[in-house]
Every structure is written in structure tokens, then in C-alpha cells.
Amino acid sequence: MSTLLVIESSMAGLVIGRGGATIKNIQQNSGAMVKLSNGDTEDTRNVKIIGSAQAQRLASGMIEKIAGKLLHSETIS
């Protein structure tokens, strides 16, 4: 199971961080794998979180704190 978040494209750089430092930190501290991809529109980015339910919740919370408002969030199988 995984979680799909949709964030504004302008926030993607903050989630990734300089040299990938922020996303690496999220992955290390949560235990989840986090992948960013293009969203359905040029204004959005998809963030896929893979890991245990607890790891997904931790990573999702960290990303929401960094990116601000999530445009969409859902659990997918």
C-alpha cells in the first residue's frame, strides 16, 4: 500500500531540498520511500510515499509541514 499526495509545483523544490537533502531526511526519519513525479497539470506534482502505514503517516506529515496545504491525499494499493 502507498499514499499519493498532490502538492503545488512551486513547493516541489522545498520538499526535495538542496542536493536532495530534505527528501533524504524525510526518508531516513520516516522509513518510507518518497518519489516525486509530474502531476496531472503543470501546476501540480505527485508525491508517492511507499512504506508501512506508520512510515507513510510520518512522511506525509513531514511533507505537509514543508509544502503547506496538500491539494489531494489518498491511500492507494
Image (cartoon, grey):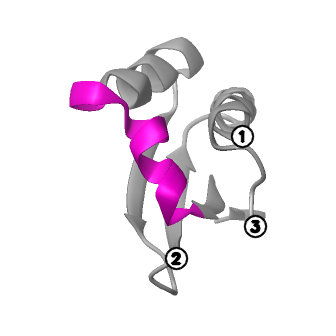
Examine the rendered structure and indicate whether residue 75 appears above or below residue 49: below
Q: Picture coordinates of residue 50 (x, y %)?
A: 52, 45
Disc 1 is placed on an element classified as helix
The residue drawn where x is 32% and y is 21% is 21
Percent x, y of residue 34: 45, 42
> Taking 39 as reference, is 2 above or below it?
above
User: Which residue is labeled 3 in the image?
Assistant: 72
Q: How far is mark 2 from mark 3, CA to CA? A: 13 Å
Magenta stretch holds residue 13: yes
- In the orientation shown, which residue stands out farthest toward the left? 19
Residue at 55 percent of width and 47 percent of height? 49
Residue placed under numbered mark 2 in the picture: 43
In contact (CB < 8 Å): disc 1 and disc 2: no
Are dots 3 and 1 in contact, CB under 8 Å? no
Which residue is identified by label 1?
Answer: 64
Q: Amino acid at mark 3?
A: His
The answer to whether residue 20 is left or right of residue 63 is left
Along the line of sight, which residue is nearer the eye, 77 or 56?
56
Give the residue drawn at x 48%, y 76%: 39
Checking the image for residue 3, the label placed there is none
Q: Amino acid at mark 1?
A: Glu
Q: How far apart are the alpha carbons under marks 1 and 2?
A: 17 Å
Q: Secondary structure at mark 3?
A: strand
Q: Main secondary structure of the magenta part?
A: helix
Q: Residue furthest bottom?
A: 41
Identify the mark nearer the N-term, 1 or 2.
Answer: 2
The magenta-colored residue range is 8-20
Residue 69, image x and y in percent? 78, 52
Inspect the image, locate mark 2, and give the three-letter code of the amino acid beneath it. Answer: Asp
Which quadrant: the C terminus?
bottom right
